[in-house]
Amino acid sequence: MDGVADSEVSREQLWLVEYERLKDEQKTRIGFRDNLVYATLAAMAGVIAATLSAKGHANLLLLLPPVSTVLGWTYLVNDEKVSAIGRYVDDVLRPRLAKGAEDVFGWEVAHRADRRRRSRKLMQLAVDLGTFCAPALSAIVVYWVNGPWTAAFLAVSAVECAVVLALAVQIVGYADLGVRRRRRVDPPIG
């Protein structure tokens, strides 16, 4: 009987260690993700400054979409991992540790239960699109209006436009605008 109790304590301790490690990873990813916004703004400023200093070369703006897309994709991947950790904690670790007590890791649920969550998520979606997609698309449009128009630059701009639009679709798809329904996951134990 004591072996069963020791095994159970040990399992719970492992789950708590897993929780701590996941929260550490989540914190690190949040910091990295948030710094990507500043990196994107700095990169945009650099591209725009270079374009303005080289008058008549609006084609230099075509450097902005790849920079925005790479940083935007990295931001999106990290944001999804942050959310995935939260879902795992809520759907797997919390039920394992709860054993009938619904308030285990209560913050994991409480911070998503706000009445204004949807409006916050919509605002965040607008900020994400405005940071990673709108400037890149604007740069492409400015190039299309001002040239110089060569077949190579037009082809590059068309591909860049498609890639930025694909990133926008992914950002919208991962926006998590709905109210999250609690679902029960029966995690494998052992």
Image (tube, helix red, strand yellow):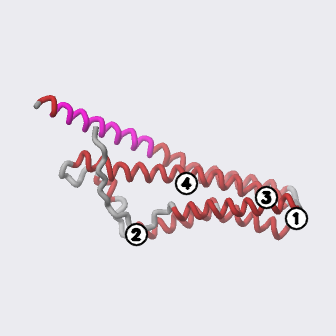
Label pair 2/1, CB-CB below 8 angstroms: no
Cα–Cα span, label 1 and label 3: 11 Å
**Disc with the residue nearer the chain's start (3 vs 2):** 2
Residue 10 within the segment the image draws in magenta: yes
According to the picture, the residue beneath numbered tag 4 turns out to be 76
According to the picture, the residue beneath numbered tag 3 turns out to be 156
Cα–Cα span, label 2 and label 1: 47 Å
Query: Taking 17 as reference, is 57 left or right?
Result: right
Q: Mark on residue 149?
A: 1
The residue at the point 84 percent across, 56 percent down is 53
**Please, what is the three-letter code of the amino acid marked with disc 3?**
Val
Q: Is mark 3 on a helix, strand or loop?
A: helix
**Disc with the residue nearer the chain's start (2 vs 4):** 4
Residue 18 within the segment the image draws in magenta: yes
Label pair 2/4, CB-CB below 8 angstroms: no
Cα–Cα span, label 1 and label 4: 32 Å
Residue 12, percent from left and from top: 25, 38
**Disc with the residue nearer the chain's start (1 vs 4):** 4
Label pair 3/2, CB-CB below 8 angstroms: no
**Please, what is the three-letter code of the amino acid marked with disc 1?**
Trp
The residue at the point 19 percent across, 52 percent down is 101
**Residue stretch rendered in magenta on the structure:** 5-26
Could you classify mark 4 by the number of other residues whose Cα lies within 10 Å: few (under 14), some (14-19), or many (20 or more)? many
Quadrant into which the N terminus falls: top left
According to the picture, the residue beneath numbered tag 2 turns out to be 116
Q: Nearer the viewer, mark 2 or mark 1?
A: 1
**Please, what is the three-letter code of the amino acid marked with disc 2?**
Arg
**Disc with the residue nearer the chain's start (4 vs 3):** 4
Residue 10, percent from left and from top: 24, 33
